[in-house]
Image (cartoon, helix red, strand yellow):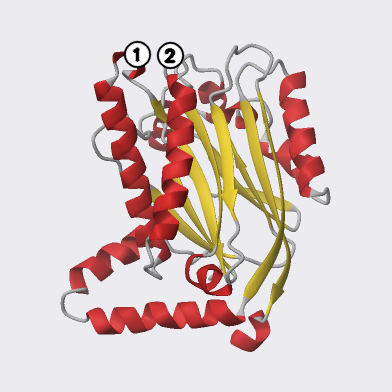
Amino acid sequence: MNQENRTKVEEAEEEHEITAELIPAELEREWEKLVERARRVRTVVKMGARTDLGRVRENNEDKFDFYEPEEDDVLAIKGSFYGVADGMGGHAAGQIASEIALKTVVKSYYADRSPEVAGSLRRAVREANSLIHDTAQMIAERSGMGTTLTAVVIRADEAYFVHVGDSRAYLIREVEIRQVTEDHSWVAEQVKRGALTEEEARYSPFRNVITRSLGNMPSVEPDIIAEELRVGDTIILCSDGLSGSVEPDEILELAAGASPSRAAMDLVDTANERGGPDNITVVVVAVKDIIGQDEAG
């Protein structure tokens, strides 16, 4: 699966939903083939992460989390999870929302024994959204709270990204960096329509207005994107405290060739040197080896 023909998994899943009643056994066999392949192919990664208050905010409403199963069977079926969330709302509500989001998604995703990663991720995100939304409705001080979520599941040699909001996922491959996710923000939509240039969007007073988040509405639809991994790839997950202050080519320069822990530290330090106007969180996942890829095909 190369960049040109990489698939948005939700489109495939929609097709599966249409045909599932007719050929569920066939779908289950296809998913089981992927699991069997995941038993033979294992991606070896090294991970680093850092979250920082920044220079302006009084509370850190960002959060990161990860889960790397030790059991071979769980690893083959579900893979490893890494995620970033950027909360919003007064009275520490944003901090609560980002924590609820990641804890719920991790718990729900691994409790679901389905081998279909995309469907499990979608269900987990919807569960987290409902919990945050219901909590905001019940407690007046938490009204309007919500959070972004950008995460990746690595199973065998594939990465499944799940995304809501304007936190970002980047993929560094060789000497290039590419933004995998699309911001769910007002300015990003205007740029896509041609109503704003990238430069205008960067300085727009509406650049922090997001159009999709967890908890804001009773339901939410996450983007899910699959990428085939290669040895040497580096995945960057970050809140807009990083992407709003550090350009992609600078992220590439700081992360390429550095250890994940060093890269995470340097990226956060650079954002703070630019004024640190927001909380800053970054997760760096470097692909060190892919075992069994050649034999599995």
Indicate the quadrant containing the C terminus: top left, top right, bottom left or bottom right. bottom right
Toward which corner of the image does residue 145 lie, by quadrant? Answer: top left
Residue 224 location, x and y as percent?
Answer: 42, 54
Residue 74 location, x and y as percent?
Answer: 51, 69
- The residue pinned by badge 2 equals 90
Q: Compared to 13, does 247 lie above or below? A: above
Q: Give, as a three-letter code, the residue at label 1.
A: Glu
Of residues 83 and 237, the one drawn nearer to the viewer in this rendering: 83
Side (left or right) of 37 relative to 21:
right
Q: Residues within 10 Å of mark 2 (few under 14, many from 20)?
A: some
Toward which corner of the image does residue 218 lie, by quadrant? Answer: top left
Give the residue displayed 44% in from the left and 13% down from the top.
91
Toward which corner of the image does residue 230 lie, by quadrant? Answer: bottom right
Q: Give, as a three-letter code, the residue at label 2.
A: Gly
Q: Is residue 67 visible?
A: yes
**Of the two numbered discs 2 and 1 in the rendering, the one whose residue sits closer to the viewer:** 1
Identify the element where label 2 is drawn.
loop
For marks 2 and 1, the one nearer the N-term is 2
Side (left or right) of 123 relative to 181:
left
Whether pointer 2 and pointer 1 mark residues with C-beta atoms closer than 8 Å, the reply is yes
Give the residue displayed 26% in from the left and 83% down from the top.
25
Side (left or right) of 10 relative to 7:
left
In the displayed orientation, state which residue is furthest to the bottom: 295
Q: Residues within 10 Å of mark 1 (few under 14, many from 20)?
A: some
Identify the element where label 1 is drawn.
helix
Give the residue displayed 48% in from the left and 34% down from the top.
99
Where residue 141 is drawn, which disc sits there? Answer: 1
Of residues 155 and 233, the one drawn nearer to the viewer in this rendering: 155
